Image (cartoon, rainbow, N blue to C red):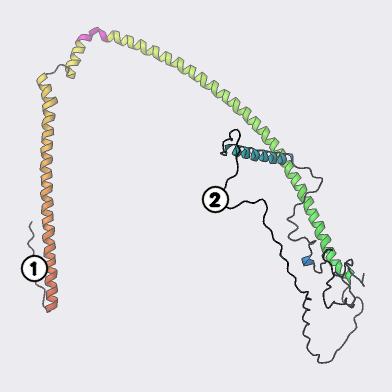
């Protein structure tokens, strides 16, 4: 292990690792022209090896081969495929099609483009050859090595002084194994927690279902009690209404018998007091003449008020114009006085009251 830590199988000069210094394989000056490329590709760097998985391996969700598919998911996918086929079939049925050809004829494809082209069954082909001279690949440019100066010194390194695979790999293995065990424990704990959550959810569902049944039973019982209470109250209200109606009828009969004894004198007296026996002339004056007179007076007063408002508006307009003219005259006199350096004369504007 100390001599050779890891060595890939010999694949015609692929990558190998050895801890001891050794002489490398001789490099060819030119590429072998007879080397075949049909064999497997040789990779010297794992960054370009196609067997190396790229990306985050935690995001890959690979199901084992023994897991059975979810029947609900399979049914949902089948239903989705069935809907897609039904929609496609309906679309094909609704798509407009040409009428069927009459007997003795058939439909053919016709070009409808602006520029027609000739359609041939066989594409025209032509073979062309060209002979080139064989040239060798340009050899790589040798690396520039400056002239050596100074004195060379050497030292001896024994086995195990620089790198010991068993010692160096131990902490890496401890970290890998520890992380793996920790991840496994976390997954087991997560599965147990999910199982406990499912059990608690199932118990909660059962408890809620029982409470829902009990609540429905109590609601139905309360509804029956309320209906019975409303029915009894309605019956009692009907009995009370019948008794009250009977009492009102008895009282009305007694009152009618007592009141109808002297009905005629009281009726005529009441009609006279309420004005049913009136003077036709007075009724006509109060009902027709007085309202007409009031409407005419109101109309005349409205005309008078409108005329006063119009006169006031005319007076206000004239006063505003005279005031503006006086203001302009004062401003002109003030400007003239400022130009001549003399006091401003006072101009009185005659404003009507």
Q: Residue at 42% of width from left, 16% of height from top? A: 241
State which quadrant residue 325 falls in: bottom left
Q: Mark 2 or 1 closer to N-term?
A: 2
State which quadrant residue 84 falls in: top right
Residue 168 lies, with reference to residue 74, above or below; the image says below
User: Which residue position holds label 2?
Assistant: 113
Find residue 347 and name its label: 1
Q: Residue at 61% of width from left, 34% of height from top? A: 104
Tell me if 317 is positioned left or right of 222 in this view. left
Nearer to the camera, 96 or 195: 96
Find residue 191 and name its label: none
Helix, strand or loop for disc 1: loop
Q: Residue at 65% of width from left, 30% of height from top? A: 214
Q: Is residue 208 magenta?
A: no
Nearer to the camera, 138 or 290: 138
Helix, strand or loop for disc 2: loop
Q: Nearer the viewer, mark 2 or mark 1?
A: 2
Q: Which residues are magenta?
A: 259-264
Tell me if 249 is positioned left or right of 81 in this view. left
Disc 2 from disc 1: Cα separation: 95 Å
Q: Magenta region's main secondary structure?
A: helix
Q: Residues within 10 Å of mark 2 (few under 14, many from 20)?
A: few
């Amino acid at each position: 292990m100390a001599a050779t830590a890891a060595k890939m199988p010999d694949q015609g000069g692929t990558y190998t690792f050895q801890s001891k210094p050794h002489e490398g394989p001789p490099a060819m000056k030119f590429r072998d022209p007879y080397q075949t490329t049909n064999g497997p590709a040789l990779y010297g760097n794992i960054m370009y090896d196609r067997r190396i998985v790229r990306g985050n391996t935690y995001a890959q969700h690979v199901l084992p081969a023994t897991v059975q598919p979810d029947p609900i998911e399979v049914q949902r996918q089948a239903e989705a495929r069935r809907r897609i086929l039904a929609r496609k079939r309906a679309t094909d049925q609704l798509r407009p099609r040409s009428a069927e050809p009459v007997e003795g004829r058939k439909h053919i494809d016709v070009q409808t483009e602006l520029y027609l082209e000739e359609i041939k069954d066989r594409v025209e082909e032509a073979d062309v050859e060209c002979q080139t001279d064989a040239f060798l690949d340009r050899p790589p440019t040798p690396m520039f090595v400056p002239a050596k100066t100074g004195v060379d010194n050497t030292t001896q390194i024994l086995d195990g002084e620089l790198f010991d695979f068993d010692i160096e790999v131990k902490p890496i293995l401890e970290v890998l194994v520890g992380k793996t065990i920790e991840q496994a424990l976390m997954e087991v704990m997560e599965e147990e927690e999910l199982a406990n959550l499912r059990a608690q959810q199932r118990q909660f569902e059962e408890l809620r279902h029982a409470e829902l049944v009990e609540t429905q039973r109590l609601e139905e019982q309360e509804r029956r009690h309320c209906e019975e209470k409303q029915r009894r109250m309605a019956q009692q209200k009907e009995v009370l209404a019948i008794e009250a109606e009977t009492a009102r009828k008895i009282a009305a009969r007694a009152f009618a018998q007592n009141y109808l004894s002297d009905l005629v004198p009281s009726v005529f007296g009441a009609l006279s007091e309420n004005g049913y026996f009136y003077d036709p002339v007075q009724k006509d004056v109060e009902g027709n003449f007085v309202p007409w007179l009031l409407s005419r007076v109101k109309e005349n007063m409205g005309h008078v008020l409108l005329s006063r408002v119009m006169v006031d508006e005319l007076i206000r307009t004239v006063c505003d114009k005279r005031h503006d003219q006086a203001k302009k005259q004062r401003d002109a006199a003030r400007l003239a006085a400022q130009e001549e350096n003399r006091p401003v004369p006072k101009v009185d504007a005659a404003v009507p009251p």
